[in-house]
Image (tube, grey):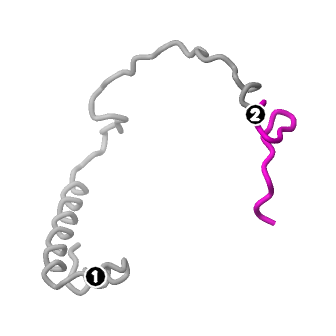
Amino acid sequence: MSLTLEQVQRIAHLARIEISDAEALSTQGHLNGIFQLIEQMQAVDTRGVEPMAHAQDLSQRLRQDAVVEVDRRSAYQAVAPEIEAGLYLVPKVIE
């Protein structure tokens, strides 16, 4: 797939981007290069290749999942203007 100069200018118009003819021509070359790269990647036979989560086979260092901070909820809610059942009450802004 390749874009024509008119298609590049239409895309710029739809995106509300002001673009000169020289910039449109340059952009056309860049976009067509990207499309050629995509076509090359799609031509590669990937049957039998398992998907990878990361390019390198690494494992994460895991740590103990433990609470390390004290519960300060009551201290934070003590300074709140209004609370009810442990929740902060705020004024209604949408009717």
Q: Where residue 66 appears, x then y in whole percent?
A: 59, 14
Q: Is residue 81 magenta?
A: yes
Residue 18 — which label?
A: 1
11 vs 62, left or right, is: left
Q: CA distance from mark 1 to mark 2?
A: 52 Å
Residue 62 sits in quarter: top left
Q: Where residue 67 appears, x then y in whole percent?
A: 61, 16
Residue located at (16% from left, 65% from top): 33
Q: Is residue 50 magenta?
A: no
Name above or below for residue 54 compared with residue 33.
Answer: above
Q: Report which residue position mark 2 lands on.
A: 79
For numbered disc 2, what is the local secondary structure?
loop
Q: Amino acid at mark 2?
A: Val
28 vs 52, left or right, is: left
- The magenta region covers 78-95
Name above or below for residue 36 compared with residue 85.
Answer: below
Say which of 28 and 92 sits in front.
92
Residue located at (80% from left, 38% from top): 87
Near mark 1 (Cα within 10 A), the count class, few <14, some 14-19 or many ≥20, is few
